[in-house]
Image (spheres, helix red, strand yellow):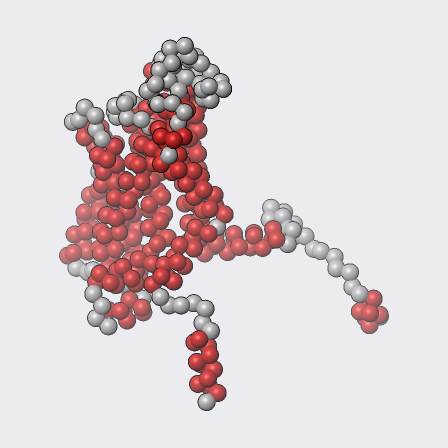
Amino acid sequence: MTTTATIRMARTEDPTPNTFWARLGSAFAMFRNAKSITGLAILGFFVLIAIFADVLAPFSPTQVDNTARFQPPSAEHWLGTTHIGEDVLSQVIFGTRGVIVVGFLAAILATVIAIVVGVVSGYVRGWKSEGLSALTNVFLVIPGLPLIIIVASMFEEPPLVLIAAVLGITGWAWGARVLRAQTMSLRNRDFIQAARANGEPLRRIITVEMLPNLMALIAASFVGTVTAAILGLTTLSYIGVIPVNTYNWGTILNWASAQGAFRQNQWWWYLPPGLCIAAIGVALSLINFGIDEYVNPRLRSAGERARAMKKKGLNVNDAVTVVRSVEVPATRREARE
């Protein structure tokens, strides 16, 4: 009776519910460290700017002020004006929308394809697995930027959705390769074997049993694809492949370069979009570092140890371990003597 009651009590007091949503919540614990939170805050700031660009921008990005050409920052134009009097701040705000849209659309498309191809090819066996693996290897060697240049040359004004689609289609192979390797490791685990023995369909095994355990890799693949898509968009815009009437930070740099802003040191025109590219790159890198710290056991234990030392007032960079002196009470000293 005592043993049965103890087992029942242990089951009722188990604080870790074995449900899909509980495992999904624990899978997103990688975003709870300081690096990921900081990166998500910076990225969220740019997302809000992209959503409320119409409200935040003081002027239209194409509004011309003939009395304020090449004007440095002032009370009316916080980031100065261009060579024809356009407000640089408004162009940067509206340019954020194009960058965010292309980056997230390309990352969503690439991540979905990587999950489908990578997880399925890692779980199934035989010619299906080998065929999907060969398809992944083909897309690994397809160059993305030259393909975008060819596709963009076929349209007078290629839409951002088309550019995002090309970036997503050419950017999923690396994530699929990593997911395939991890899925091949998971398919022989006990809980997968138990689900297979219970007759669960492939769809449920992948979505319920495997995906929560792959969330860290999926998130890292998503962040990496966003970074690559944003850099690809700004690069293509800067070199003039994407039409200049498509607002993003790369086109602003293209206009500044064409009008000699770099030579004439008109920093208010090219520095703000450059800093925005750097800031969003730092945000995505911090998110990636936070995910890596959570996934890698060595980095995670080192981070926990560093935080514990900071709480105790110790410097983690000290080469010599500090030994604190503790005053022994008088009663203990007398007992020792």
User: Horizontal placement of 124 versus 48: left or right?
Assistant: left
Is residue 51 toward the left or the right of residue 332 in the image?
left
| Residue 95: percent from left, percent from top | 35, 28
Find residue 324 and report its horizontal and vertical position in percent: 71, 56
Q: Residue at x 29, y 62 (%)?
A: 208
148 relative to 92 in the view: left or right: left
User: Closest to the observer: 162 or 85?
Assistant: 85
In percent of width and height, residue 111 lies at 28, 47
Does residue 283 appear in this view?
A: no
User: Residue most toward the top?
Assistant: 67
The residue under the point 50% across, 47% down is 34
Instruction: Give residue 218's position: percent from left, percent from top.
Output: 33, 50
The quadrant where residue 149 appears: top left
Closer-to-camera residue (337/272): 272
Q: Quadrant of the C terminus?
A: bottom right
Q: Where is 175 relative to 54, above or below? A: below
At x 29% / y 36%, what residue is drawn?
Answer: 102
Direction bottom: furthest residue: 1
Q: Is residue 18 above or below residue 117?
A: below
In the displayed structure, 314 sits above or below 243; it is below
User: Can residue 218 be seen at all in this image of the molecule?
Assistant: yes
